[in-house]
Image (cartoon, helix red, strand yellow):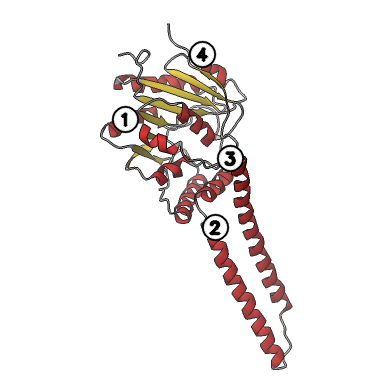
Amino acid sequence: MDHQTQENIYLSIVIPLYNEEDNVDVLIDTIIQNVLPLKVSYEIILVDDGSSDNTWNKIRQYSAPVKGVKLARNFGHQHALLAGLSESKGDAIISMDGDMQHPPSLIEKLVEKHKEGYLVVNTYRNDAHVASYFKRKTSSMFYKCFSFLTDVSMAPGTSDFRLLDKIVLKELLKLKAQDLFLRGAVEWLGFESVTIPYVAGERFSGVSKYPLSKMLNFAKGSIISFSTKPLAIGVWLGVFTSALAFLEIIYIIYQVLIGETVAGWASTVGIISFLFGVLFIMLGIIGSYLARIHVALQNRPRFIVEEITEKKDV
């Protein structure tokens, strides 16, 4: 049965877009070229994450199987991806980026693994030829820190290019974290998975939408969302620095008792500065957790859909 008239959809492909007007046409054409040979019913869900260019008008030009979702403003990549996942109707759902660095040619392998029975099909990115040394190293450091602090093991090279069964998606949508980190959430759910390696493609057009500042905020929010270990580390730092201060006091008292002058004002000031530095770091960590509790209590929606377009072919 044709994908345009079939009621039950097997494959949903969800793609968040932000200022990607020059990528829309080649993205859709390439995806369709790779999906048609699979002979499955499918839909392509493009989520415009508050773009300021012509991305939404590009999306609106397409009819089924393309479905457009326009967010009221820029909510961020993870929230836009969640919006698309929420609209998907397929038995298998593939998420990918819209800049062609996630190769549509891998869709066939993802579907094959799903048909073998895997509920989660992850991908492993080899981007040595397209990403800078700095970006690759910082990404690797983040995943190591995330795995250590959260007890959710994630390998470097993990991305949002994956396939989820509808059973997994149902459980994923139940999670209510404000700081979305879908990669970590999928791992946390614990469903049996398999990983497929791929070579990242060149960006077709435009520039990366993730500068260093966004990457740092994303990393901080992801770790705080999944772990309270930073607070526990703070407790042990407090114990350690308190012990240092206590030893310093004992040393000063001993020097006074034996009639010696207590020297070393510079070292004393240095220790005090160090202790205050640790204190302010811990106050910052506690403040980050309190800020997220404040946001969670407000119960704001994680995204707002302004318009959905799903024109049917005639």
Identify the residue shown where x is 72% and y is 83%.
Answer: 263
Numbered disc 4: secondary structure: loop
In the current view of this chain or complex, which residue is farthest to the top? 314
Amino acid type, callout 2: Pro
- Seen in the picture, residue 93 relative to 142 is either above or below; the reply is above
Tell me the distance, in whole angstroms, between the alpha carbons under discs 4 and 2: 48 Å
Q: Does label 4 or label 2 sit earlier along the sequence?
A: 4
Front residue of 137 and 178: 178
- Label 1 element class: helix
On screen, residue 14 versus residue 256, left or right, reads: left
The residues tagged by marks 2 and 1 sit, at their Cα atoms, a distance apart of 39 Å
Q: Is residue 282 visible?
A: yes
Q: Secondary structure at mark 2?
A: helix
| Residue 165 in sight | no
Residue at numbered disc 4: 61
Query: Circle 1: is it few (<14), some (14-19), or many (20+) Cα within 10 Å?
Result: many
Of the residues tagged 2 and 1, which is closer to the observer?
A: 2
266 up-or-down from 293: above or below: below
Task: Give the label, 3 or 1, closer to the camera.
Answer: 1
Relative image position of residue 258 (x, y in whole percent): 69, 93
**Of label 3 and label 1, which has the lower sequence position?**
1
**Which residue is outermost to the bottom?**
258
Residue that carries the numbered disc 1 in the rendered image? 111
Which numbered disc, 3 or 2, marks the residue that appears first in the sequence? Answer: 3
Q: Nearer the viewer, mark 4 or mark 2?
A: 2
Dot 3 amino acid type: Pro
What crowding class fits label 2: few (fewer than 14 Cα within 10 Å), some (14-19), or many (20 or more)? some
The residue carrying mark 2 is 230
Which one is in front, 27 or 235? 235
Whether label 3 touches label 2, CB < 8 Å: no
